[in-house]
Image (cartoon, helix red, strand yellow):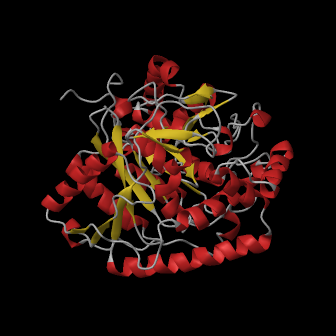
């Protein structure tokens, strides 16, 4: 096999080459610029670049590398940031026309963390308006294409991020995930992604509406997208920790991996569910992957699921909480229209009615939903007393053609010849996200159609190192990231 181009190596490998002085940060930055010039026009993944600031940062990193001694963990690594995360001095829009020319005067805390760790932040990646879709397009920047099939989207909302990572246009990326926005693009574009446990990564500077986040939004998390599981853990170690205003009193120490040997892991699997049946394409890929896991000497309980937890609670509890958490972006005429749907739901799809109710609900209603969430969290805590990880689909489908008419709540998708609600795309990710569980996505197959399929490795709250460790085993067993055709 021919040696991979620099831009297709993992961030961990690139950091090693920088430390060993095999390549300079300026050379690596120029390499990514060349790949961007070659491939980004057809992908439209990276939408804003600040070459001058990046070159200054790369020069500073090279000077520090030349001086020797102990170096920060990302020193000299060029990387990008999802356009929903404020980046000082660089246009950051949230995909919304209202912020088309917005340039923040301060970094989001995660951006400050990666800069402090030595990363060279050179650009921003595409997304849907206010991160509210499973695709990546908006009025400002247009549509991002999937490097495996340009007629398809790379998932969303961190779609530009996953496309850029998959095509080797960036060293790594930080995205956001409330309904699956890190995990879905990792699955659709064939890369790795980690949704951290809720609460371990500060979210200040996340752009989900015009006034930003001045506190911690419910359900949402910020997390890494990269070409290897090692990269995801490297980045998690940089961005995880207390908020800056709490750092004088609090620190974060994640539990260690539950087991060192993969064969010691107690593994459950829930690979399909009648509430959201997976497509034949995804089912076959996941079955082959789990067969390989079992052949490697690991016992997998394919009937694993928390006792007394209905899968459909994600519709009745999870999705309303997620929709409520994203509701500050729905103002003006849209808010008024949603209020009218609450008053007269006749003729509106159930998903649209749910969105309307969640947007206009009373605080009492939210508190009652949150109480049910807590009960479900306890069920997951008991479940992970018996299991270390749960394997599950990321979505019921693999990458699908661009579909931009309508919204997440009123479109449909054709799945194995059956027309189904579009918002089912986020059901398998929301199932674990609304209860705050960590989930690592790793590619496990390329389907006969030629698009990737990933799997979720879900663990107990704060069990991030355990999900990452088992995902690393799957990566070694099944091959992990592959370079998309035509992007070598």
Residue 213 is at least partly visible in this image: no
Residue 280 horizontal side relative to residue 151, left or right: left
Residue 322 is at least partly visible in this image: yes
**Count of all numbered marks drawn on residues in the image:** 0
Q: In this orientation, which residue lies closer to the viewer: 220 or 87?
A: 220
Q: In this orientation, which residue lies closer to the viewer: 46 or 313?
A: 313
Q: Is residue 442 above or below residue 325?
A: above
Q: Residue at x 61, y 48 (%)?
A: 111
Q: Is residue 302 above or below residue 336?
A: below
Q: Is residue 65 above or below residue 236?
A: above
Q: Residue at x 47, y 47 (%)?
A: 184
Q: Residue at x 32, y 62 (%)?
A: 469
Q: Quadrant of the C terminus?
A: top left
Residue 119, percent from left and from top? 52, 43
Q: Quadrant of the N terminus?
A: top left
- The quarter of the picture where residue 411 lies is top right
- The quarter of the picture where residue 168 lies is top left
Residue 263 horizontal side relative to residue 155, left or right: left
Q: In this orientation, which residue lies closer to the viewer: 271 or 477?
A: 271
Q: Residue at x 59, y 41 (%)?
A: 82
Residue 432, percent from left and from top? 49, 64
Residue 246 horizontal side relative to residue 458, left or right: right
Residue 474, percent from left and from top? 26, 54
Residue 122, percent from left and from top? 57, 33
The extreme front residue here reads 346
């Amino acid at each position: 096999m021919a040696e991979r181009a620099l831009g297709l190596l993992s961030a961990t490998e690139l950091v090693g080459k920088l430390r060993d002085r095999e390549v300079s940060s300026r050379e690596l930055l120029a390499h990514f610029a060349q790949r961007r010039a070659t491939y980004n026009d057809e992908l439209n993944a990276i939408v804003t670049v600040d070459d001058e600031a990046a070159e200054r940062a790369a020069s500073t990193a090279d000077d520090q590398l030349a001086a020797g001694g102990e170096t920060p963990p990302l020193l000299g690594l060029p990387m990008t940031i999802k356009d929903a995360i404020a980046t000082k001095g660089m246009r950051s829009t949230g995909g919304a026309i209202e912020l088309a020319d917005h340039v923040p005067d301060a970094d989001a805390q995660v951006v400050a963390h990666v800069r402090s760790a030595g990363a060279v932040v050179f650009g921003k990646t595409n997304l849907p308006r206010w991160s509210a879709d499973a695709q990546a397009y908006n009025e400002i920047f247009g549509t991002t294409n999937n490097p495996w099939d340009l007629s398809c989207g790379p998932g969303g909302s961190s779609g530009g991020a996953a496309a850029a990572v998959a095509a080797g246009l960036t060293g790594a990326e930080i995205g956001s995930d409330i309904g699956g926005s890190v995990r879905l693009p990792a699955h659709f574009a064939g890369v790795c992604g980690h949704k951290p446990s809720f609460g371990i990564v500060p979210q200040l500077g996340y752009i989900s509406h015009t006034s930003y986040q001045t506190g911690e939004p419910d359900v949402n998390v910020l997390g890494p997208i990269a070409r290897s599981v090692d990269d995801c853990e490297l980045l998690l170690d940089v961005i995880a920790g207390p908020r800056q205003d709490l750092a004088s009193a609090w620190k974060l120490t994640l539990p260690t991996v539950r087991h060192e040997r993969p064969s010691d892991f107690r593994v459950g699997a829930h690979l399909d569910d009648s509430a959201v049946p997976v497509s034949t394409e995804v089912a076959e890929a996941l079955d082959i992957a789990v067969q390989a896991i079992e052949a490697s000497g690991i016992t997998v309980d394919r009937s694993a699921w928390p006792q007394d937890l209905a899968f459909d609670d994600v519709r009745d509890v999870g999705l309303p909480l997620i929709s409520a958490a994203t509701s500050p972006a729905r103002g003006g005429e849209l808010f008024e229209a949603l209020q009218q749907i609450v008053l007269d739901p006749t003729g509106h799809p159930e998903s649209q009615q749910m969105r309307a109710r969640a947007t206009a609900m009373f605080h009492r209603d939210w508190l009652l939903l949150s109480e049910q969430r807590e009960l479900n969290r306890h069920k997951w805590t008991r479940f992970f007393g018996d299991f270390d990880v749960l394997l599950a689909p990321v979505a019921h489908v693999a990458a699908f053609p661009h579909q931009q008419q309508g919204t997440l709540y009123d479109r449909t998708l054709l799945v194995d010849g059956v027309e189904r609600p579009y918002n089912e795309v986020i059901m398998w990710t929301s199932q674990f996200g609304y209860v705050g569980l960590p989930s690592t996505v790793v590619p496990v197959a390329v389907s006969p159609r030629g698009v990737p399929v990933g799997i979720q490795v879900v663990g107990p709250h704060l069990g991030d190192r355990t999900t990452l460790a088992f995902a690393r085993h799957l990566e070694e067993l099944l091959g992990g990231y592959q370079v998309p055709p035509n992007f070598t």
